[in-house]
Image (cartoon, rainbow, N blue to C red):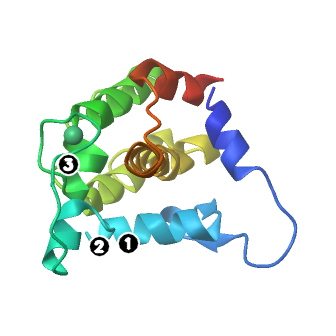
Amino acid sequence: MCGLIMGLFKPQPGPGFRGKFFGGVKAPRRISFFLWTAARGKILTCDNLMKRGHVLAAWCCMCKKGWETVDHLLIHCEVAAALWGFIFQRFGIQWVLPAKVIDLLFGWFNGLGKHSSDIWNLIPHCLMWSLWDERNSRIFEENEQSLLHLQESFVG
Ligand SMILES: [Zn+2]
């Protein structure tokens, strides 16, 4: 289970690795920072770039249907929703995804805390980082992985 998680989060020597975030989760600093920024709705999705004056097509490159916002990309996009659903299925839980990233993270580490384990606590980091990585890969490298491949990366 969660081969990608283990790959992403395998211990690395040196200072700065153990960034703490929600629930005292230990994750690489860049991923903790990304999640913290996403929770505040500040990652550079199309909507935020446009607020800064950039003019661009704001379609989500994952589903090619929705307007790309932080919450769409990381929760409500059909690709994101499929990945969350896949994880919930693996853990045998049912949970209606909240509207915003900050609420998802709060719920994850509180209401769903009974599932608490090292792997469970790292899933939001891993899943959102994977979505962000895939989104950037599609935009900047024109390299697109299938949903199946993304799912498989969690169970490798
Ligand atoms: Zn989308």
Residue 42, label in figure = 2
Residue 84, label in figure = none
The reply to whether discs 1 and 2 touch (Cβ–Cβ < 8 Å) is yes
Q: Indicate which disc, 3 or 2, sits on the residue closer to the N terminus.
A: 2
Left or right of 109? Residue 18 is: right
The reply to whether discs 1 and 3 touch (Cβ–Cβ < 8 Å) is no
**Judging from the image, what secondary structure is the residue with disc 2 in?**
loop
Q: Residue 43's x, y, as percent?
A: 33, 68
Dividing the image into 4 quarters, which one contains the N terminus?
top right
Q: Indicate which disc, 1 or 2, sits on the residue closer to the N terminus.
A: 1
Q: Which residue is mark 3?
A: 72
Q: Which residue is mark 1?
A: 37
Q: Residue 3's x, y, as percent?
A: 67, 31
The reply to whether discs 3 and 2 touch (Cβ–Cβ < 8 Å) is no
- Report how far apart the C-alphas of labels 3 and 2 lie in the structure: 13 Å
Q: Residues within 10 Å of mark 1 (few under 14, many from 20)?
A: some
Dividing the image into 4 quarters, which one contains the C terminus?
top right
**Judging from the image, what secondary structure is the residue with disc 3 in?**
helix
- Whether 123 is drawn above or below 48: the answer is above
Residue type pointed to by label 2: Lys
- Residue found at x 30% / y 48%: 74
Q: Residues within 10 Å of mark 3 (few under 14, many from 20)?
A: many
